[in-house]
Image (cartoon, rainbow, N blue to C red):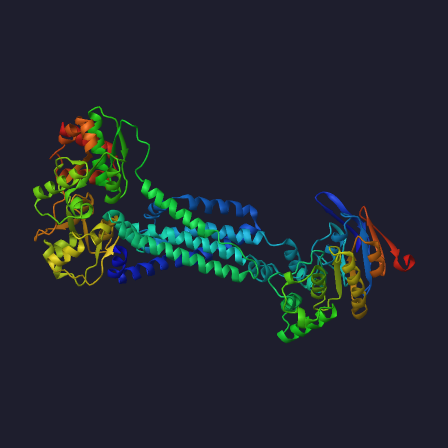
């Protein structure tokens, strides 16, 4: 019911996402056919060229999609956030099934048919167009079908780099701790794959009169989907040593630094620690700690209230902390004293614009809202304490709808003038590095987001030294400290563990 | 064919072979498997080129022929037939005319004429798919296809080899009838002596790369 409700209220957005999703898949498949078909023909006719060709396509297939996007990101022409890079990645994935099925289709033609064609005086070109391709067509179409289904699935990842599509709901849901939003994207994607499978299977059968084949991709898609769901569910579940304290973190720099900070602090106390950093969004960390898969991670009070506990926003920091501590306490989780800094959302613009247009507060944005393009991370786009609340609190009406992308990318998108105003983290190291400026929250719209370690109460009881050690961190990290550590990793590309070690050494 | 030698994978298949075939003549070639019968056929339409010596077709060395032009003037019937499974019977027969750029109506008329000739009434068979035919019917289509542009030379590689003996017998007499109509030069390969003597004006026996002739009339 919640799901139907979500779809109804997001109807236009859902339509746009499906459209974008299809756009990504169709374009990449079309280009992949344009490349893969000739490559498959060469592979079938010249095995000596074909073998390395197929090997190369297989290797492209084995690169995890997020890693592939990461590799492509800095490349000229194809790099940069947005749909282009997603299409390039999808093409690389679509190539293998198309090349392989084209080559296989051509090789499986009865040699006497080819002989007959040659003996009756067909030129190689006529042989290809009149005999080989028509006979290989069902196999080629089945390759295209597999490529399309794989593409529809893989395209969900494209949302991570701001390419849009149904993956946006999935990522948004993951970071919002809301399975309804995940399903809102996952179900249409699965349906698209089934429809594509059905249509292309039908085409395949039409092309081979009388030769009926069972669709093998449908069970494969189901299997792949179940594996994916299992993998998501299992994220964070691993073989931790029985006596070790398992420290987790979400998947962005500051969180990894804070996870490492907890881990090193505990290790200095002589405890054994297993690190399960970079787990994903708030959703996954919350699930993991409630399931006992991790023992500790750092959460932010505002996020805990709004996104996890779904409680009303509390503006007063002390009250927010108390509300969080009480709610977690009932769930068997101990909230330790805040680390010090407040990683609130920050509305950020280019430093040059701020100077030129004299922008200092969020109120000042109303002078430029008709021309400016906003860009947000997933969480900010959907959360009640995010864009919607901000817009009504300040009476902002951007003419251009916000572009939604991974949080790590919004800063670079802003610096490279793809968007003009973003919601970032107040503690991001990139603000200074990219010469960006934070606008003052003059109406005090954003609630406090103080970082607090959360530890399973069972662990606190079994190891009192855990609480002791982590309590010593209370109030030790200022906003400047956190920005400096984030910049060390994000801008100077320093090692996380070394950065944390230096910080702890300075505390002593 | 003069002093033709052909070797494959280091093995000499045909050695210093001489053979002259007159226009309109029907020559049957017999021999054990691997004796080089198919090789000899493939030398004629330049699917293969000799290592030494020369193969002359219409007084011209096959090396000088454009292979495509030569093959279009040469009908070829394979033992495996090799009908195009994605084309109807009519389209199969009309394929060489299509390659030669004949207009539609003429192609169609020719295909129907030939189907009639090989005993497959076009009304019933023209629109069928190859997989809907029996082995004998397929072979008839193969013959019709080879004759489509009325080529002066027809090569047949064990044309009836894959058929049962009754169908074979039937096709053999059918073929004799067709031969009387057309009077092309025919070179065909078989391992069946009876067939060779029934259809060939002359019968050549290929053995260890050499060819010896038996006048068919003498054997009858």
Image location of residue A181, percent across then percent down: 27, 52
Visible in this render: residue A132?
yes
In the visual, does A421 lie left or right of A241? left
Q: Is residue A171 above or below residue B59?
A: above
- Report the front residue among A309 and A108: A309
- Report the front residue among B56 and A296: A296
Image location of residue A114, percent across then percent down: 63, 56
The residue at the point 29 percent across, 59 percent down is A14
Q: How many marks?
A: 0
Q: Quadrant of the N terminus of chain A?
A: bottom left
Q: Quadrant for residue A502, please give it.
A: top left
- Report the front residue among B133 and A344: B133
Q: Is residue A275 above or below residue A179?
A: above
Q: Quadrant of the C terminus of chain A?
A: top left
The residue at the point 90 percent across, 59 percent down is B220
Image location of residue A404, percent across then percent down: 25, 54
Q: Quadrant for residue B169, please give it.
A: bottom right
């Amino acid at each position: 019911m919640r799901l139907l409700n979500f779809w109804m209220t997001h109807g236009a957005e859902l339509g746009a996402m499906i459209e974008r999703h299809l756009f990504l898949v169709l374009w990449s498949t079309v280009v992949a056919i344009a490349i893969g078909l000739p490559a498959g023909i060469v592979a079938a006719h010249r095995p000596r060229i074909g073998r390395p060709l197929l090997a190369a396509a297989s290797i492209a297939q084995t690169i995890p999609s997020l890693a592939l996007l990461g590799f492509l990101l800095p490349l000229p022409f194809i790099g940069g956030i947005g749909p282009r890079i997603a299409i390039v990645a999808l093409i690389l994935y679509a190539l293998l099934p198309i090349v392989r099925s084209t080559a296989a289709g051509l090789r499986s033609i009865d040699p006497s048919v080819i002989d007959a064609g040659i003996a009756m005086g067909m030129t190689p070109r006529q042989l290809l167009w009149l005999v080989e391709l028509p006979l290989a067509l069902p196999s080629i179409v089945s390759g295209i079908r597999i490529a399309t289904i794989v593409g529809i699935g893989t395209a969900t990842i494209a949302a991570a780099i701001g390419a849009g599509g149904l993956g946006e709901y999935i990522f948004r849901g993951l970071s919002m701790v809301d399975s309804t939003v995940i399903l809102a994207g996952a179900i249409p994607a699965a349906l698209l794959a089934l429809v594509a499978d059905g249509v292309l299977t039908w085409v395949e059968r039409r092309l081979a009169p009388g030769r009926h084949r069972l669709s093998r991709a449908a069970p494969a898609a189901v299997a792949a989907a179940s594996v994916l769901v299992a993998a998501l569910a299992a994220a964070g579940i691993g073989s931790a040593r029985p006596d070790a304290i398992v420290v987790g973190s979400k998947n962005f720099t500051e969180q990894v630094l804070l996870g490492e900070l907890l881990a090193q602090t505990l290790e200095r106390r002589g405890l054994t620690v297993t690190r399960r950093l970079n787990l994903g969004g708030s959703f996954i960390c919350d699930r993991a700690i409630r399931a006992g898969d991790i023992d500790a991670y750092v959460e932010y009070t505002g996020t805990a209230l709004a996104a996890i506990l779904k409680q009303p926003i509390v503006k007063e920091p002390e009250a927010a902390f108390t509300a969080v501590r009480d709610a977690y306490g009932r769930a068997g989780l101990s909230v330790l004293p805040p680390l010090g800094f407040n990683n609130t959302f920050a509305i950020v613009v280019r430093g040059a614009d701020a100077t030129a247009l004299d922008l200092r507060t969020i109120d000042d944005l109303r002078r430029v809202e008709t021309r400016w393009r906003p860009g947000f991370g997933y969480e900010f786009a959907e959360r009640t304490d995010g864009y919607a609340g901000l817009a009504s609190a300040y009476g902002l009406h951007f003419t251009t709808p916000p572009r939604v992308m991974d949080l790590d990318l919004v800063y670079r998108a802003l610096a490279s003038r793809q968007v003009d105003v973003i919601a970032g983290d107040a503690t991001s190291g990139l603000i200074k590095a990219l010469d960006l400026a934070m606008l003052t929250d003059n109406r005090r719209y954003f609630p406090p987001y103080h970082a607090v370690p959360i530890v399973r109460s069972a662990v606190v009881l079994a190891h009192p030294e855990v609480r002791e050690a982590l309590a010593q961190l209370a109030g030790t990290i200022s906003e400047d400290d956190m920005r400096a550590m984030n910049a060390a990793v994000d801008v100077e590309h320093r090692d996380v563990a070394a950065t944390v070690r230096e910080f702890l050494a300075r505390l002593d | 064919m003069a002093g033709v030698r052909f070797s494959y994978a280091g093995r000499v298949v045909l050695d210093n072979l001489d053979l002259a075939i007159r226009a309109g003549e029907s020559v049957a070639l017999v021999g054990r498997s691997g004796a080089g019968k198919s090789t000899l056929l493939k030398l004629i339409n330049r699917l293969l080129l000799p290592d030494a010596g020369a193969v002359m077709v219409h007084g011209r060395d096959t090396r000088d022929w454009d292979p495509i032009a030569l093959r279009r003037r040469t009908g070829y019937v394979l033992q495996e037939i090799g009908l195009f499974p994605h084309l109807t019977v009519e389209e199969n027969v009309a394929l060489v005319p299509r390659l030669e750029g004949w207009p539609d109506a003429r192609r169609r008329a020719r295909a129907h004429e030939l189907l009639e000739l090989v005993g497959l009434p076009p009304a019933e068979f023209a629109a069928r798919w190859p997989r809907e035919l029996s082995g004998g019917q397929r072979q008839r289509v193969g013959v019709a296809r080879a004759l489509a542009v009325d080529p002066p030379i027809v090569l047949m590689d064990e044309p009836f080899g894959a058929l049962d003996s009754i169908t074979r017998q039937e096709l053999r007499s059918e073929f004799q009838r067709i031969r009387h109509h057309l009077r092309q030069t025919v070179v065909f390969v078989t391992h069946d002596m009876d067939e060779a003597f029934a259809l060939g004006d002359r019968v050549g026996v290929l053995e260890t790369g050499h060819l010896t002739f038996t006048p068919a009339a003498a054997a009858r």
